[in-house]
Image (cartoon, rainbow, N blue to C red):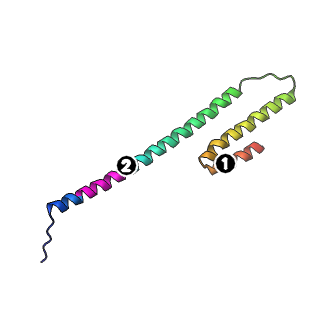
Amino acid sequence: MLAMSITKDEVSHLIEVNNKALMNSFKDLLQDTVSQITRANEDAADLQMGKIKKLKHSEPHRFKRKANEDQYKFNLKLEETVDNVKPAAQKSQLKIINSEPAEGEK
């Protein structure tokens, strides 16, 4: 029968290595969670800014001619489409980038 003897220093070393690995795992998990929360907050802020812009542009304007009003509405929709694509492009959100030009063409 073989008897394995582990010294106190070896046990301490193994515990230290295990603790470091555990702390690194916890740190990685915490960083991932923070980045997910940050992304969610940025997305929510972008959505709110979009709504604010819509409200700003929804106030009634008076035009002398119907064609001027139509051009104004078209320009607002075009601006909204471009504004939606910019943040999506920065975040590489391809679904939005691909759908917005089609929306703008409508």
64 left or right, relative to 84: right
Q: Which mark is residue 27?
A: 2
Residue 69 lies in the magenta stretch? no
Tell me which amino acid carries mark 2: Lys
* Res 43 quadrant in image: top right
- Image quadrant where one finds the C terminus: top right
Q: Secondary structure at mark 2?
A: helix
Using a 10 Å C-alpha cutoff, classify the residue at mark 2 as few (fewer than 14 neighbours), some (14 to 19) or many (20 or more). Answer: few
- Image quadrant where one finds the N terminus: bottom left
Identify the residue at image location x=63%, y=32%: 51
Image location (x, y in percent) of residue 36: 48, 45
Image location (x, y in percent) of residue 94: 63, 51
- Main SS of the magenta part reads helix
Total residue callouts: 2
Q: Is 93 placed above or below 59 here?
A: below
52 left or right, relative to 78: left
Give the magenta-colored segment's residue range.
15-27
Q: Which residue is mark 1?
A: 97
Q: CA distance from mark 1 to mark 2?
A: 33 Å
Identify the residue at image location x=44%, y=48%: 32
Q: Is 7 placed above or below 60 here?
A: below
Q: Which of the pair 104/32 is nearer the observer?
A: 32
* Res 7 quadrant in image: bottom left
Of the numbered discs 1 and 2, the one sitting upstream in the chain is: 2
Identify the residue at image location x=87%, y=25%: 65
